[in-house]
Image: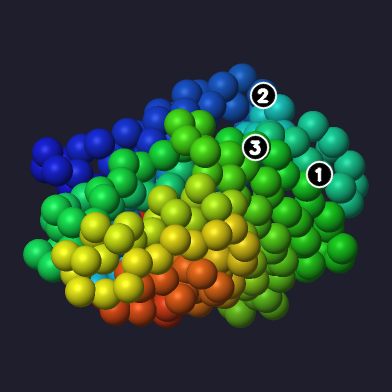
Amino acid sequence: MRLSLPFAPRLLPVARLALMALSLCAVTRVYAENVTDGPNIMLGAGVQRMPAWVGSSDHRNQAIPYIQAELPYHITLSTLDGLTVDFIHGDQWRGGLYGNYLWGRDRQELGPKLGGIVDSLSPRLNGGGYLEYQATPQWNLGAELSHDTQGAGAYLNVYADYDLPVIGYLNHSLQLQWQAMNGAAMRRFFQLTPVQAGKLGVAPSTPSGGAQQVALEYDAFMPTSQHTGIAFAVNYTRLLGDAADSSLVRHFGSANQLTTTLAFVYRY
């Protein structure tokens, strides 16, 4: 997310999340008599190394604002996990609204071989609902169902979070996630039309809906002082089904996807 012109459209969803976090953080001051009574908020900046496009074997580095916040009115906001608003408020059950954003791809990221042939994609916000069950203090199970706010794509994520034992001051966790897409979302990311395929010399691909990926993520936070720390995440994703079998991925990318995030944060 450099502020150069080619990346500017991609900054808008993240900028909205950052501005939302700052405004909500201001609200929390009204509800917290002191720091220990207030919500848990981490704000910072970092860099994310991610595939150049979904299914790519090449990577790009992207500057990101880092947000991890538990806010009043049962709202959570996260750079990695999106926005949730809990309406259930149960001891074990939580559920309500869910929102997140999806990275796009431009001609530069597609590279000289694909750029101008394969469609560029703008980033999109998606919204929907979620349901979580706190099975134990360490185990958290959930699902998210969302839809593009400016398109026909629909997404289902099923996940399990596990808080690993604390090592000294290191807090860390694992998340296993499975995702499915409907046909419109699959085709948006992985389709090659006959015309495009002809120009690239490969078979066309028209994927249908179904399982799209499975991912394992490790998240960690190491304090460096009372209010500062280092946040780190590594995510390994394996594309599945028509996504992995598409000509776009098989000939020009990889079904194995790796994303790493490193950020310096200030903790309220």
Residue type at mark 3: give it.
Gly
Quadrant of res 48: bottom left
Mark closer to the observer (3, 1): 3
Separation (CA) of disc 2 from disc 1: 22 Å
Q: Residue at x 82, y 64 (%)?
A: 137
**N-terminal label among 3 and 2:** 2
Q: How many marks?
A: 3
Left or right, 56 with respect to 28, comes to left
Q: Is residue 162 left or right of residue 146?
A: right
- Residue shown at the point (65%, 37%) measured from the top left: 128
Image position of 233 with respect to 185: above or below? below
Q: Where residue 155 sits in the image (x, y, percent)?
A: 60, 50
Structural distance between the alpha carbons of marks 3 and 1: 14 Å
Residue 124 is situated, as x and y percent measured from the top left of the image, at 41, 39
In this view, the residue in front, 116 or 69, is: 116
* Structural crowding at the residue carrying mark 1, measured as other residues with C-alpha within 10 Å and reported as few (<14), some (14–19) or many (≥20): some
Q: Which mark is residue 31?
A: 2
For numbered disc 1, what is the local secondary structure?
strand
Looking at marks 3 and 1 on the same chain, the residue that comes earlier in the sequence is marked by 1
Residue located at (65% from left, 57% from top): 157
Residues packed near mark 3 inside 10 Å, few (<14), some (14 to 19) or many (20 plus) = some
Rendering coords of residue 140 (x, y %): 77, 61
Mark 2 or mark 1, which has the lower sequence index?
Answer: 2
Q: Secondary structure at mark 3?
A: strand
Q: In the image, what residue type sits under mark 2?
A: Tyr
Note whether residue 154 is visible: yes
Q: Of the residues shown, which amino acid type is indicated by label 1? A: Arg
In this rendering, which labeled residue sits more in front, label 2 or label 1? 1
Q: Which mark is residue 128?
A: 3
Secondary structure found at label 2 = helix
Disc marking residue 94? 1
